[in-house]
Structure formats: C-alpha cells, structure tokens
Amino acid sequence: MTRLPITKTPKVYVGGSFIRSESARTFPLKDAAGTFFANIPQCTRKDLRNAIEAAAKAGPGWAKRTPYNRGQIIYRLGEMLEARKADMADALTVGGASKAAAAKEITAAIDRLIYYAGWADKYEQVLGNVNPVASPHFNFTVTEPMGIVGLLAPDEAPLLALVSLVAPAITGGNTVVALASSTQPYPAIVLGEMLATSDLPGGVVNLLTGFRKEIVPTMATHTHLRAIAGVANADERKALKLGAADSVKRVKLSKTEEPVDWFSAKAQSLYDVRDHLEFKTTWHPIGA
Amino acid sequence: MSAPAQNVFRRLFDEIGPVDQVGIEERVAKYTTRSIKKNSKLWGLKAAVSMVDLTTLEGKDTPGKVASLCQKALRPHEDPTIPQVAAVCVYPAMVKHARRALGEDTAVRIASVATAFPSGQAPLRTRLAEVKAAVADGADEIDMVINRGAFLSGEFGEMQDEIAAVVQACGASTLKVILEVSELETYDNIRAASFLAMRVIRPGDFIKTSTGKTTLNATLGNNQVMLEAIRDFYLDTGIPIAMKPAGGIRTAKQALQFLIAVKETLGDEWLNNTRYRFGASSLLNDLLRQLEKERTGAYQAPYYFSEAAESY
C-alpha cells in the first residue's frame, strides 16, 4: 500500500503557540524551481494586533529576568539552531539558496545569537554610567527596555537578517513582533519551531508572515509599539515615520535600495542593543 | 440530594421547564460569529459604556480609590460624546465616600454589595442591617447574594423569604439578586434560581450572575439561561426583570457579544442601562480603548487609559 504524504502545515509562532492567521487566509509559496511548496499564513493587521497583545503580556516577565538569564536563553536558542541545522538548511534551499550558502547563513545566524547572548549581561556596564556632578549627589544612568519592538525583515538573508534584528532587541529585555520576508517566509516558520524549544518565554518573540502592505500601515500607527526597526523601501519608510511621529516611536530603518551585508561584522553591534533601550538618570543624595 | 429536596426541584421544573444545555451552548456559540462593524460597533461600544457598573470590591479599597473611581464614572474619557457609566459598585463602608465624590445631583448611581457579600454566610438580621445601612448612606442600588445553601437543599421558601426581606429593607433602592452561578453547578439550577428570585422582586429589579469572587463568572452560556428565564417570566407575567452579568467580562469584544445575546433574546427594550448592566472593573478601559481606536484609526496602548495596571 502506498503511503499518503504527510505535509506540514506552516503556522506562525505567536504568543508561544503556533497559529494560523486570524482571517485563516494563506498565500501559496513556490520553491525556487517554481513548484508549489506550501500555503503560508497571510497575517494581517489583526494578527499584528494580537501579536502585540501577546508581546505586551510577555514583556514585564522578560524584562524582569536577570540579564544573565536572558543571555543563557539566547545562547540556548543558538544551541537549538545548531542542533537543527539540517532542517533550517532545507528551509533556506526552498528559497533557492545553495547548500553551501545555506550552511554559511545558518552558521552566521548562530554566531550572531552567541554574540548577543554574550552582551546580555555586559551591555549595562558599557552603556550605563556613574556621572560626575558638582553637588553632593550620586548620579547614575541605567538602561531600561523600551517595550515592544516592531521589526521588518528584508528578503535577502531571510534567516540571518531576521535573527540580526530580533537578537539585539530581546537582549535588551524588549519583546518583538517581526514580519518575516514575504518572498522567503519559510525559514521564519522553522525558526519559530526552534524558538519554541529554546526556553524563551512565549510571546517574547512573535513572528508573522504575510504581505508588507497589509502590516506596515498598522505597524506605523499602533501606539503600543515603542520602536520600529528593519529594512523598508521609500514609501514604507515615509508611512512608518509619519505614523511613528504621531505615536512617538523610535524608528531605525535601513533602505531596501541599499542592501545591508548581513554577514559583515558591522551587522552586529552593541549599538543595535542600545537602539532599543531607554536611559534613566537618577540623582541620589549622598549621605541620606 | 435528599428525596424531599429532589421532589421540590422536580415540582419546580414541572412549572418552569428545564434547560437544553446543548441547545444553549450551540446558540451562544453563534453569538461570537456575528460581525459588528463601523456604526453598529460604535453604538454598541457606547451603549456598553453606559451600562457599566464600575466596580471596586477589594479589601484594600480606600476612600481615595473610590473617589477616583467616581471621577472616572462621571467622565470616563476626555471625548464628550462618550457617556457616563451607569453606576459605581462598592462595599457598604465605601458608599458614603462614593456619595461625597459623586454629589447628590448625578445620573451615576451608587450600587453597594450588601448581605455579607460574597458568601452571604451571616445571620439574616446582620445582612438586613447591612442593607439598611448602605441605603441610609446613599446607595441607590443594593446587590445581594442569595442563600445558595438553602437553594441547593431545596429550601426554596427560606431563600425567597430572605430575598423578600431584603426587598423590604431596600426601600426605594433597586435590588440586584446575585445567584452566584458558579455555585449552582447546572443550567437547570440557574434557571430555577432565576425564577425563584424573579417571583419575589419588583419590576425593574435585577438578577445578576456572580459575585466575581469565584473562579467561574459570567459566561455567554449562563447569561443566556438567565436572559431566557427573564423572557419566559415576562411573557407569563408581563413583569420586566433586568439583568446584570458580572465578573470575567474584560474586553469590548466580549461586551458586544453579550449585547448581541440581549438583542436577540429580549430585544431592544432591554438594550439600555435600566434593563441591562455589566459588572466590571477593567471592561471600561478596554471599551474606551476600542472607541479611541475607532476615532483615530490607530490601535491604542492600554497604558493610555487609567487604571491599566501594567505599564509595559
């Protein structure tokens, strides 16, 4: 008897569980050869809203974890990716990457996670400060996470770019809602399955798949997002900056027209962690 | 259950009929599929605001907290098109503070839980004294709990006598009878308790689902059982009884679903705050949040609204 094929239903990772889009709509994904591969959830503004609710719920708990523990968990995420390299390589080859290119991208993504895992309990020492003041005060500056960060991943390096955007934001104690590449969403689906087994509390990272034109306008105006980062074209940048101005969000976008080299050492930096931190300065009277 | 108790329940169900549990659950599942958009949504959200009994029932309540709750009740949001809430709901000791904060000349009513809320396990004379004290302090409405022990052991007369005594003690104040549905265990019992209560209260008095102090609170299912009891009682006697689900209704979406249930079971005459209320503390903020979303087109962060506990 021939066995019927068991195909996987791709689902997005939101609030610690795997869900279909709220509208139940999907879009067909074709592999590099043009044959149908799978139906990918077509998330819309309501999914973004729900993901932000999930991120808001997870936020206080994640921010309260010790930086050391956050580092451990991000390191563990690297371990999960390392152990499941083959799965991820298959996911990347769907988009047309060669075996060698996929392996290179996965290695870079793991290294990136380890890099930020290392920073988790160290960035405070570099970014925080004891400030000299001309009065009997102990004056110090400490960092705090901003809250919920919206991320827009580019089409190139669909895994590495996504990881490079997510990792610095969660290192600083933020929670994220990320829209994966529209043309190569499948690695993000597989990444979600790895996040689910990495001790990362549900809701800290929420990955959506779908079309930018349905998500970007809501991402711009949603007042609960505190920052937006990623890659966007000229029209999207304008929409995002206008919407962000109304709700006073921090926006840091690179341009689609000037591709970033995600493999470069410049694509990882302490300053990417700083981009999603607020600074709090406290005056404490000496001797009181 | 003892044999005599079984007999009184059987006699009561012969009169009022039992509840079709599967039918009720099928029916309410449909309510969550209705698509309420644009103007009807706006109407529903504003109607829901006007039906809120803004509640604080905690051991840590202070006169200051009650005063700020009253401010919120009078002016829920800076947008003047958003109505005031129906009432504030507080413990008897807080009634005089609520009255001072609201003033005498106000449309916002003061509801007070009384009768040894939430358990009701105090001597009847103590419970009646509590009701009278709350009314004397200025409570416009009294939320009482029924004697669940008496009900479950089939002592319907005792349960109804106690309600009737509280009706007397209320004077001109409106009475809301809390059935505490989570302790009644079955839909049949909820219907039975609803009828027993409705037979001794006055037109315009309320039956109410829960105290909000137990794990299971107002659901669409038990709301529907009570709405249908009110409908059947109204068709029999012509006496309109009002309804108040309480506890567990936290989102605007849920509130709209409850309003759909009212609209489709009892009709437009019950879609106002003299016939339908929501007992809730956090619902109002979510209603305001959704109204602001409708006004601006942008999803709102909860911390833009007062009393959102989390600041993340």
Image (cartoon, helix red, strand yellow):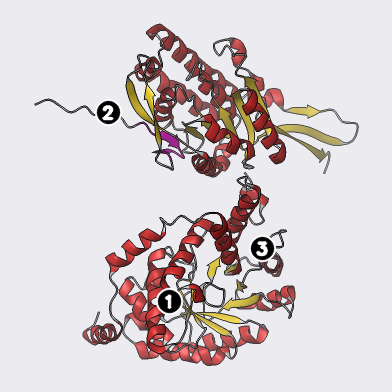
Check the image and report above or below for A42 versus B72: above
Task: Determine if marks 3 and 2 fall on one subunit.
Answer: no
Please tell me how crowded label 2 is: few (under 14), some (14-19), or many (20+) other residues with Cα within 10 Å. few
Image point 66% across, 66% down: which residue?
Answer: B83
Residue tagged by mark 3?
Answer: B82
Residue B7 in the image: x percent, y percent? 23, 86
Please tell me how crowded label 1 is: few (under 14), some (14-19), or many (20+) other residues with Cα within 10 Å. many
Displayed quadrant of residue B223:
bottom left
Residue tagged by mark 1?
Answer: B179
Secondary structure at badge 3 equals loop
Image point 72% across, 28% down: which residue?
Answer: A128
Amino acid carrying label 1: it is Leu
Check the image and report above or below for B286 versus A64: below
In the image, which residues are magenta? A10-21
Residue A17 falls inside the magenta stretch: yes
Please tell me how crowded label 3 is: few (under 14), some (14-19), or many (20+) other residues with Cα within 10 Å. some
Secondary structure at badge 1 equals loop
A71 or B72, nearer to the observer: B72
Residue found at the far right of this picture:
A134
Check the image and report above or below for A10 versus A57: above
Residue B10 in the image: x percent, y percent? 24, 84
